[in-house]
């Protein structure tokens, strides 16, 4: 494990990459095979691989500029080691998000998992009583994916362990499938939602009035 400050710093640097007012040199340290999973109503698998995520984030910031004035990131002794409640500010309004970060032993981010911070989308049964997902029954994907939480944190969608987990867990199966067809899967989600503009992409999860 790294010092708690490391995990908080990496999470804050991640949000700097989405903040037009932040230092453009402040960026997180990703593992080569980093994965980003954004639960519905977001676009699900939105990043796979260090170079792709860095490139996509730059394009997203240019296409839908945002700032993130409200950030509360904390370190935990169990994976995911960093968990944040933040509020993005878009042209369409504010957007509250709950996000978790899994790391390998090198302190690199291996998995980013995000939810809308509206109660109906969060993975905790009682967000008011368990705001940081520390209780039983939290529905996060990061603790179910073979490879995450190991020293290197490498996820192989074709491994025996992944296939065995996928046979028992529909979310793991969906991740494995999307990892093998990333652009096809992402474009399908984007064409269904994103082609209708910022309000269609962000509105449902941000709670914006239609």
Image (cartoon, helix red, strand yellow):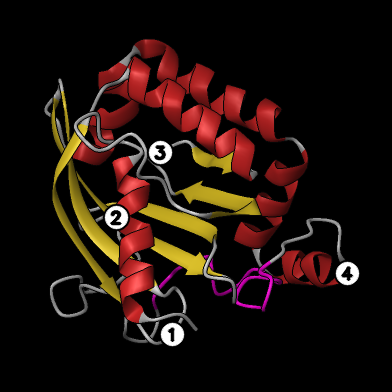
- Residue occupying the point 60% across, 22% down: 187
Depth check, mark 1 against mark 3: the one in front is 1
Decide: few, some or many residues near mark 1? Use Cα within 10 Å; few <14, some 14-19, many ≥20: few
Disc 4 marks which residue? 160
Q: Position of residue 165 (x, y in %)?
A: 74, 71
Estimate the spatial distance between the alpha carbons at disc 2 and disc 4, rounded to whole Å.
35 Å
Q: Position of residue 72 (x, y in %)?
A: 17, 62
Estimate the spatial distance between the alpha carbons at disc 3 and disc 4, rounded to whole Å.
29 Å
Depth check, mark 4 against mark 1: the one in front is 1
User: Which secondary structure, mark 3?
Assistant: loop
* Dominant SS in magenta: loop
User: Which secondary structure, mark 4?
Assistant: helix
User: Which secondary structure, mark 2?
Assistant: helix
Estimate the spatial distance between the alpha carbons at disc 4 and disc 1, rounded to whole Å.
25 Å
Decide: few, some or many residues near mark 4? Use Cα within 10 Å; few <14, some 14-19, many ≥20: few
Q: Position of residue 167 (x, y in %)?
A: 77, 66
Disc 3 marks which residue? 42
Is residue 149 covered in magenta?
Answer: yes
Estimate the spatial distance between the alpha carbons at disc 2 and disc 1, rounded to whole Å.
19 Å
Depth check, mark 3 against mark 2: the one in front is 2
Point out the residue furthest to the top here: 196
Depth check, mark 2 against mark 4: the one in front is 2
């Amino acid at each position: 494990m790294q010092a708690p400050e490391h995990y908080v710093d990496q999470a804050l640097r991640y949000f700097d990459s989405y903040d037009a007012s932040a230092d453009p040199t402040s960026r997180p340290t990703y593992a080569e095979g980093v994965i980003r999973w954004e639960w519905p109503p977001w676009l699900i698998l939105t990043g796979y691989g260090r170079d792709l995520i860095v490139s996509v984030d730059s394009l997203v910031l240019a296409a839908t500029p945002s700032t993130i004035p409200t950030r509360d990131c904390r370190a935990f002794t169990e994976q995911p080691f960093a968990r944040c409640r933040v509020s993005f500010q878009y042209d369409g309004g504010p957007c509250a998000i709950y996000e978790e970060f899994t790391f390998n032993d090198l302190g690199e981010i291996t998995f980013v998992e995000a939810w809308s911070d509206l109660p109906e989308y969060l993975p905790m049964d009682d967000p008011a009583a368990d705001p940081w997902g520390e209780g039983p029954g939290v529905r996060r994907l990061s603790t179910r994916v073979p490879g995450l939480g190991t020293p290197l944190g490498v996820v192989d969608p074709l491994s025996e362990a992944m296939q065995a987990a996928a046979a028992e867990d529909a979310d793991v199966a969906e991740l494995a499938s999307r990892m093998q067809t990333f652009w096809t899967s992402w474009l399908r989600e984007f064409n269904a939602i994103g082609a209708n503009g910022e309000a269609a992409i962000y509105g449902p999860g941000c709670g914006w009035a239609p």
